[in-house]
Image (spheres, rainbow, N blue to C red):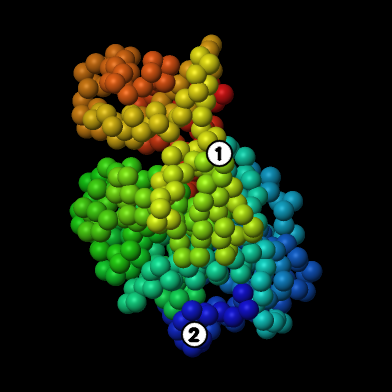
Amino acid sequence: MTACIPLAGPRSADAVIARHDGQAIAWGWVLQHSASLAGRLRAQGVTRLGLWCADGHLLLIGLLAAARAGCTVVLPPADQPGLLHDLSGAWDVLAGDGAGMMPVLAEGSEAMTAPIGDIVIAFFTSGSTAQPKRVERRLDQLQAEVAALHALWPGVGWGFHHATVPHQHIYGLVFKLLWPLLCGRGFFSSSHQYWESVEAEMQDGDVLISSPAHLSRLGGLGAMPRPALLLSAGAALPMRAADEAESVFGLRPMEVFGSTETGAIAARPAVASAPWSVLPGNVVTADADGLLMLTSPWGAGVHTGADAVDILPDGRFHLLGRADRVVKIEGKRIGVAAVEAALRTLPQVADAVVIKVNAGRDQLAAAVVLSLLGRAELAQWGAFRFGRRLRAGLAGQLEPMARPRLWRFVDEVPCNAMGKRTESAVAALFDVGAS
């Protein structure tokens, strides 16, 4: 990134780029501390900087400092001691606002005012497994993605960006922090842990970056401030959650489809069966097996994903499910996504996730979040008989081997901070391993 704020022009030193604990964070203050941290990194010979910051403005200082010093930035997905220990070989020093980390803010160092250059940023994503997978992107690639977001949503008159998702992941980093920074707006530094915090801090016309894991927990909330844009990413947003979000925020959510490897690919309104529209600059086609192929200005070459797609004549597309979520039961290939979709059509079901387990034999197991009707019927029939009733309710849509035989009824589906359902977490509900 050879120039900051390329989409909105240079900022003055007193321009407010963030809010934290009721205080305004000025752009000049951020640049000053990034130069100081860059000097410390250069003096210590750091080439790989681990960076964990609960507050976004500190993460920004660390990111800019690394870009001045030419360091690779490594972003651990969480700050649990065991995880940090396992990943510690990925960095020379870990900086941030946690115990035992090099402080991002410190005085007495000789400032390094080198230009802000392009650097590698390493993220960790678990996908459908419990093991962190390292994915590298470049800062210039993230800037190109922001340019596409700016072209799609110019955001004239928009306020601050707020997020319920962490900025240690690519979605939070790009959408909550880099997008407003590069486009002349600001961001709320902390990620909101509770909706009460959103209600207290967000104003009409701000932007809210969220996920299905959070938007599915709006029950009991009254009207909230109305954002200019409400985004959800990380997993499919159930339509019941989209309806409730529209009721609470007065605005229908927009879904974003993408991954850590690709960045944002496409967006759509959270409406049943709505096709996906690719972001400006992206080109989506299908390979010979019907799997998504992406060419992107912020990618590296052609990316072939595991999602089956139906390409429409106008370039939009429908997702048909992931090819890697096809399992065999009794010799029959079954698309797990189709089973989950069938479950969500039942009036007793608010949400569901299905995996294959081996409990003496291969079979499907479902973790189900119940609707009010479902809770009443569970209380009436008991778990065993209620599970059989759900199986019977699927008879018109699924073959017998495609109907789950094992059931767990939960308040929410286990997921990580980005709202992705990991098979290991779901399998733990059944005291067996996913197979």
Q: Residue at x 46, y 29 (%)?
A: 335
Quadrant in which the C terminus appears: top right
Mark 2 Cα-neighbour bin, 10 Å: few <14, some 14–19, many ≥20: few
> Horizontal and vertical percent for residue 57?
51, 70
Q: Which amino acid does label 2 sit on?
A: Gly
Q: Is residue 372 left or right of residue 121?
A: left
- For the residue pair 298 and 155, the one nearer the viewer reads as 298
Mark 1 Cα-neighbour bin, 10 Å: few <14, some 14–19, many ≥20: few
Q: Which residue is drawn at 27% across and 42% down?
A: 240
Up/down of 16 relative to 265, above or below: below
Q: Residue 289 carries which label?
A: 1
Q: Is residue 218 left or right of residue 177?
A: left
SS class, disc 1 = loop
Q: Residue at x 40, y 31 (%)?
A: 338
Image-quadrant location for residue 42: bottom right
Q: Which amino acid does label 1 sit on?
A: Asp
Whether residue 215 is visible here, answered yes or no, is no
Q: Is residue 392 left or right of residue 62?
A: left
Q: Name the residue under label 2.
A: 9
Up/down of 154 relative to 166, above or below: below
Quadrant in which the N terminus appears: bottom right
- For the residue pair 22 and 181, the one nearer the viewer reads as 181
SS class, disc 2 = loop
Q: Which residue is drawn at 25% across and 63% down?
A: 225
Whether residue 349 is visible here, answered yes or no, is yes
Per the model, the C-alpha gap separating discs 2 and 1 is: 45 Å
> Horizontal and vertical percent for residue 141?
59, 66
> Horizontal and vertical percent for residue 346?
27, 29
